[in-house]
Image (cartoon, helix red, strand yellow):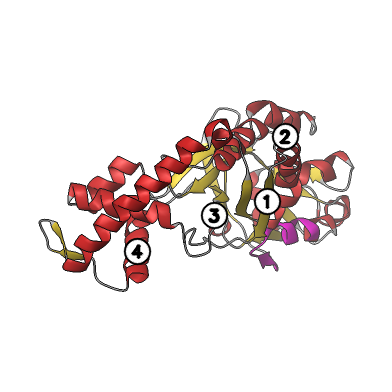
């Protein structure tokens, strides 16, 4: 638990009399404020606030804890001042989580560049598709590819994830090549468990949107598995361009439906607070914003032409 941040959250709640006001002041999600308060009460071993429908008020233990938190924050601020120039230099351990596919295709390269640029830093990369509790699991940054972020998250869009419908030449030789999105209904489509509930969405050359329900004999909660199954001739897959692009360029997969563009998704960095962000995290977000930028996406697209 980040006790300094928890102390700042508690002081802000006490001074403003509202968790919503504290969240706004700290530029932090309301869910994170609630979690930090719960962690602070667990640390103090006592209930710190009386909660009513109109306003929050401090308990006796809350009064005592507030005074201690203010003293702790004064010391923390003095430490930051005494650190001088080095206070803004990225350093220390950064814990990141993302999917295996995103890590292998893109993030490992970005992390390598980050570590070269900032030799005082270290990265602990945890690969998972589930939505983790950043505070409980001590995660600094979660990367997610989605169009449906929860509204209470603190997030920064880092880029856009374009996708491509693809299949192995061996599958197409045996089953034929779909010419229209509607033709996918007659094919074995390999699906990602969390991606659109087996409803693939496209826009045509005129910008009209259409949705196509698909089905097949394999689904998985990791799109890397779906990609490998498609490469081995198991069926047709809808895959991120950053994952499928190298296999398409190598001739192991064929890009399908050239007149139709699959729905793009956002690549987001999720973290606990914008205001109390370490230099290491800020530097990583800035690097990733460039890494996932429009020029890199253009390179992926050019690789298919």
Residue 254, how many percent across, how many down? 82, 44
Tell me the element at label 4: helix
Residue located 60% across and 60% down the image: 129
- How much space separates mark 3 and mark 4, taking CA atoms? 38 Å
Q: Would you call the spot at circle 2 few (<14 residues within 10 Å), some (14-19), or many (20 or more)?
A: few
Q: Earlier in the sequence, mark 1 or mark 2?
A: 2
Check disc 1 and report the residue beneath it: 123
Check disc 3 and report the residue beneath it: 196
Kindly identify which numbered label has been placed on residue 40. Answer: 4
- How much space separates mark 3 and mark 2, taking CA atoms? 38 Å
Check disc 2 and report the residue beneath it: 117
Evaluate if marks 3 and 4 touch, with contact meaning CB atoms under 8 Å apart: no
User: Depth check: 102 or 132 in front?
Assistant: 132
Residue 2, how many percent across, how many down? 46, 57
Tell me the element at label 2: helix
**Residue 225 in magenta stretch:** yes
Residue located 64% across and 30% down the image: 290
């Amino acid at each position: 638990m980040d006790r300094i941040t928890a102390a700042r959250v508690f002081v802000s709640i006490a001074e403003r009399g509202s968790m919503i006001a504290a969240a706004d002041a700290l530029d932090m999600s309301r869910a994170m404020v609630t979690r930090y308060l719960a962690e602070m009460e667990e640390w103090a071993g006592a209930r710190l606030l009386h909660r009513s429908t109109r306003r929050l008020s401090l308990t006796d233990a809350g009064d005592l804890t507030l005074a201690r938190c203010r003293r702790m924050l004064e010391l923390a601020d003095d430490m930051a001042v005494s650190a001088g120039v080095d206070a803004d230099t990225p350093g220390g351990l950064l814990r990141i989580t993302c999917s295996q596919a995103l890590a292998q295709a893109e993030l490992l390269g970005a992390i390598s560049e980050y570590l070269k640029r900032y030799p005082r830093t270290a990265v602990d990369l945890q690969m998972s598709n589930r939505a983790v509790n950043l505070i409980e699991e001590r995660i600094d940054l979660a990367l997610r590819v989605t169009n449906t972020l929860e509204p209470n998250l603190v997030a920064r869009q880092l880029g856009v994830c374009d996708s491509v419908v693809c299949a192995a030449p061996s599958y197409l030789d045996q089953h034929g090549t779909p010419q229209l999105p509607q033709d996918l209904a007659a094919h074995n489509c390999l699906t990602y468990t969390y991606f659109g509930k087996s409803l693939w969405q496209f826009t045509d050359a005129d910008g009209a949107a259409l949705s196509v329900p698909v089905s097949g004999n394999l689904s998985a909660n990791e799109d890397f598995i779906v990609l490998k199954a498609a490469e081995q001739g198991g069926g047709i897959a809808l895959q991120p361009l950053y994952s499928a692009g190298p296999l398409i360029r190598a001739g192991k997969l064929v890009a399908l439906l050239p007149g139709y563009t699959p729905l793009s998704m956002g690549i987001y960095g999720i973290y606990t607070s914008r205001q109390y962000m370490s230099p290491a995290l800020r530097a990583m977000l800035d690097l990733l914003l460039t890494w996932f930028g429009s020029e890199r996406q253009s390179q992926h697209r050019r690789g298919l032409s």
